[in-house]
Amino acid sequence: MLKQITVTAALAFAMLFAYCPTTASAQQSDSKSKQSQSQNDSRKKNSKNQNRNQDQQSDSNERANGSKQSSESLTGEGQVRASKKVKIPGTTIENLVVLIDMKKPNSDRTVTRVVDLGPVKNLKSLKVRQGDQIKTTGRVVQVKDKQVMMADEVTSHNQTKKIKRQKPKSKSERDNKRDN
């Protein structure tokens, strides 16, 4: 049940920080212009697919090396780009979720990762804000096409906190509480 709620929460976080690429479209009456636009769109789409395939290949190679498996604990360090308090469905718990720009190991590339830092009430002493440098340790879960790090430990302002995640009550426990 905890895993199901965690994945549901992670999905909510991923959706909150998801972005939708925009495409410019101009209305043109000339059929040649439309055909040219269609060809350009196809090229852009193919280019995006090639980039995605390269990233997936890179991720597959990292998984093969054991550096990205969700059962293993990973450590990442970077700057907080954005933060948001997110209510966990089916609970009264509010988690702090951040976007962190992290440098990939053995690379000059920077990746932006969604990180769930756990319940807000447990993190008040850390005061994590946009622009802060933080270090997180946790496991990565796949939620649709997004990867979300579920932090087990976070270090900010020379303070380290272990994340205590409260197990959400089951649906039957919540229903019983409402009936009483």
Image (tube, grey):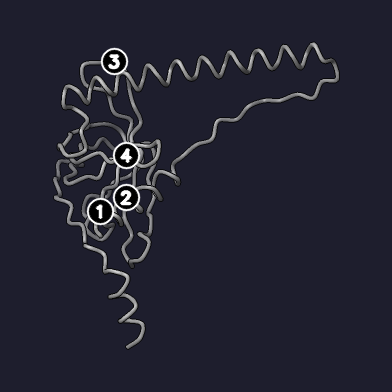
Q: Quadrant of the N terminus?
A: bottom left
Labelled pair 3, 2 in contact (Cβ < 8 Å): no
Sort mark 4 into few (<14), some (14-19) or many (20+) by Cα contacts within 10 Å.
Answer: some
Quick one: SS at disc 4? strand
The amino acid marked with disc number 1 is Lys
> Residue at coordinates 20% horizontally, 33% vertically from top-left?
69
Quick one: SS at disc 3? loop
The amino acid marked with disc number 2 is Val
> Residue at coordinates 39% horizontally, 48% vertically from top-left?
11
Q: CA distance from mark 1 to mark 3?
A: 34 Å
Please give the residue where the numbered disc 4 appears in the rendered image: 142
- Name the residue nearer the viewer: 133 or 31: 31
Q: CA distance from mark 1 to mark 2?
A: 6 Å
In x, y percent, where is residue 84? 39, 49
In x, y percent, where is residue 100? 32, 35
Say whether residue 41 is left or right of residue 14: right
Q: CA distance from mark 1 to mark 4?
A: 12 Å
The amino acid marked with disc number 4 is Gln
Please give the residue where the numbered disc 2 appears in the rendered image: 7
Eye-nearest disc, 1 or 3: 1
Please give the residue where the numbered disc 3 appears in the rendered image: 108
